[in-house]
Image (spheres, grey):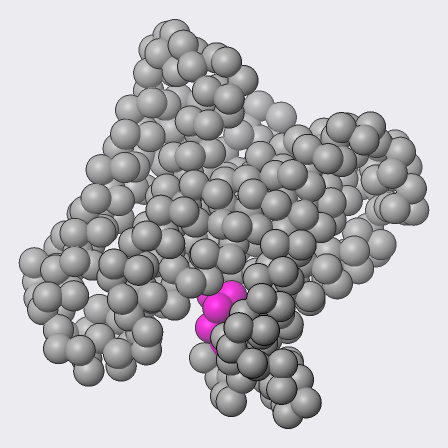
Amino acid sequence: MNSVLGMTLFALGGLAGATFILPSRGIKGWAYETWWMFYSVFGLLVAPPIIAACTVPNFFSVIFAAKPSTIVACMGFGILWGIGGLTWGLMIRYLGIGLGLAMGCGLCAATGTLIPPIVQGHAADLVKDAAAIQVLCGVIGSLVGIVFVGLAGKIKEGELPEEEKKKAVADFDFKKGMLVALVSGICSAGMNFGLQSGGEIEKAAVAAGAKAIWGGMPVLVVVLWGGFLVQAAWCLQQHSKNATFGDYTRFSPRNAILGASVGLIWVMQFVCQKTGEPLVGADLKYISWAVLMASTILFSTIVAIMTGEWKGTSAKTRGCLTLGLAVLIVSFLVMSFGSR
């Protein structure tokens, strides 16, 4: 166990989650769905098995030795995440990195805390004692923080002329962005549900000779199988709708590398989460998702400031954004300590 290293890995995962979309800014001449397919193939289908093969002996045997119900659960939650992951990209497209990730991560953290006990028929556990009430207060606080962040985005929309908004976020659309953020924030929690559903596979990986910190890699592979099905289906549907299959005949090595880089950086956030969990120990494993989301919000805010997404806004708008971010971070800490 090494709690400091584990927490550092969670934070590095947040950094990956905040910056993975940046390489896409250099892609030219390809439709959105074309480079998103490259992201999906490399980030969801290629990179995870390579990492698993390098860290877990006979990882395919480990996966298929698990109960079918475990594999189905992991893939099912992966499909749920696939819907959220798809709209996650659209959320950033319409709201930008700063506003989009703050909204998405806040909703995702709240959803990841509330849904499991409700689905399992233990809704009463949310208020059964002081610790549970503390967690619930943290969830409510995160929703309050989301309101403030959303308000900042709404004020920004009214303050800046259209050309200024488009400079930082080319497709800025507050209404569309808020709609996809709602869907994305709820469905994206499926990733954590899937990763936490593969305990049987993790134990088998360690029994097969893998180090404990790498035991979660086969689980990530299975979850992302489900996610890839959704992502690839959407890309193909968009290619058919927009007649953009021709992008592949106009192959651009630069675009392909940048699209693949989006996927490789993206997947590292969950590699960091799963490798960090054994380092903090079973008693602190619960904080991984909250720290990952909080770190993503912090780093995405820094990136948004550096890329000029909030340039030209008033002190009122920036103050509202700052307040919302502060409430979100405090809420995550409250949820973490309450869960413990």
Instruction: Say which quarter of the image contains residue 76.
Output: top right
Q: Where is residue 84 in the image (x, y as percent from the top left)?
A: 49, 50
Q: Which of 71 and 25 is in front in this view?
A: 71
- Magenta stretch bounds: 19-24
Residue at 29% from the left image edge and 54% from the top image edge: 178
Q: Relative to residue 53, is residue 292 drawn left or right?
A: left
- Looking at the image, is 190 positioned above or below residue 160? above
User: Where residue 46 appears, x then y in whole percent?
Assistant: 75, 63
Residue 6 visible here:
no
- At horizontal 48% and vertical 43% (from top left) the residue drawn is 187
Q: Is residue 21 above or below residue 256?
A: above
Q: Which residue lies furthest to the top in this view?
A: 128
Residue 136 drawn above or below residue 81: above
Q: Tally the numbered discs.
A: 0
The answer to if 21 sits in the magenta stretch is yes
| Residue 238 image position (x, y, % from top left) | 54, 70
Q: Considering only vertical position in the picture, is 277 above or below 102?
A: above
Q: Which of 263 and 304 is in front in this view?
A: 263
